[in-house]
Image: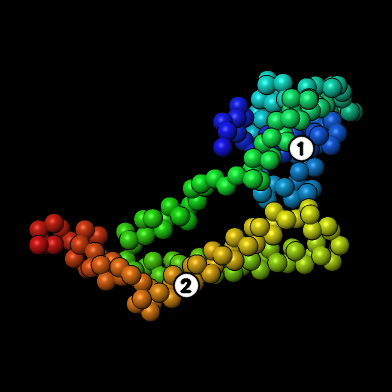
């Protein structure tokens, strides 16, 4: 993946939104939220204005006009530039076409799982499964509402992807719990010994003998 001058995906979301029409930053934010894009891209107003300033600095957007409505502070309307449009298309194409290594929190936890006793790890994995089931239920309800409103599927494919990931996560977690409880997990006996008399047993070194 290429090294970009701005790496925050929020910057790409701003470019895509401004490609529709010129807007001021607050309108960009409300547009993204109304389309539930904050569920896929981290959005807060502080980082939004930082991103807008960076896009402006690199010539990817430019001010169109500054105005005031009533007693509100002045707001600058921005539009995307030609270099900004090229950056948008190249960046989006890269995200869609090129898989990258993503360091997830769960993967980090799994890599260090042996530090927990098997019984505790099992309980925690079961708790994860319960929370995943709840998340899947909520997301399925959202999809049902979207279907009732006849919203085009095109505009919610990222939510479908999220649901697919949750289901895969739940399937993996459930299978891992079954292997631990059923005694079929390769290395389970070594894992138990590590907590019975090994370095994670809590015994003093001389007691581990």
Judge the density around disc 1: few (<14), some (14-19), many (≥20) Cα neighbours within 10 Å.
Answer: some
Rounded to the nearest whole Å, what is the CA distance between mark 1 and mark 2? Answer: 40 Å
Is residue 132 or residue 204 the one in the foreground?
A: 132
Apparent side of residue 71 relative to residue 166 in the rendered image (left or right): right
Image location (x, y in percent) of residue 154: 79, 54
Q: Is residue 87 visible?
A: yes
Q: Quadrant of residue 139?
A: bottom right
Give the residue at x 69% y 26%.
55
Return the residue at label 1. Answer: 16
Q: Identify residue for label 2.
A: 175
Q: Which mark is residue 101?
A: none
Left or right, 92 with respect to 200, comes to right
Crowding near the residue tagged with mark 2, few <14, some 14–19, many ≥20 C-alpha atoms within 10 Å: few
Whether 131 is drawn above or below 32: the answer is below
Q: Position of residue 146 (x, y in %)?
A: 80, 62
Q: Is residue 30 above or below residue 63?
A: below
Q: At 84% across and 58% down in the image, what residue appears?
A: 151
Which quadrant of the figure has residue 142? bottom right
At mark 1, the secondary structure is: helix
Is residue 15 shown left or right of residue 46? right
Q: Sequence-wise, which precedes: disc 1 or disc 2?
A: 1
Where is residue 96? Give x, y as percent: 66, 46
**Residue at 73% of width from left, 36% of height from top?**
89
**In the image, residue 56 above or below residue 194:** above
Q: Nearer the viewer, residue 203 or 51?
A: 51
Question: Which residue does the image show at 15% across and 58% down from the upper left?
Answer: 204
Residue furthest bottom in the image: 182
């Amino acid at each position: 993946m290429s090294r970009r001058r701005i790496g925050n995906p929020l910057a790409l979301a701003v470019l895509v939104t401004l490609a529709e029409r010129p807007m001021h930053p607050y309108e960009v934010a409300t547009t993204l939220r109304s389309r539930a894009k904050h569920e896929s891209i981290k959005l807060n107003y502080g980082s939004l204005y930082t991103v807008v300033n960076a896009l402006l600095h690199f010539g990817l957007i430019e001010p169109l006009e500054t105005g005031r409505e009533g007693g509100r502070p002045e707001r600058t309307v921005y539009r995307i530039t030609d270099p900004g449009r090229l950056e948008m298309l190249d960046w989006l194409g890269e995200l869609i076409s090129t898989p990258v290594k993503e360091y997830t929190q769960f993967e980090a936890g799994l890599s260090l799982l042996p530090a927990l006793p098997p019984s505790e790890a099992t309980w925690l994995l079961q708790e994860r499964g319960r929370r995943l089931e709840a998340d899947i239920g909520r997301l399925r309800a959202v999809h049902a509402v979207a279907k009732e409103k006849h919203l085009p599927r095109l505009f919610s494919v990222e939510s479908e992807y999220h649901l697919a990931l949750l289901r895969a996560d739940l399937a993996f977690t459930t299978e891992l719990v079954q292997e631990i409880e059923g005694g079929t997990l390769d290395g389970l006996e070594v894992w138990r010994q590590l907590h019975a008399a090994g370095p994670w047993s809590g015994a003093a070194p001389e007691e581990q003998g």
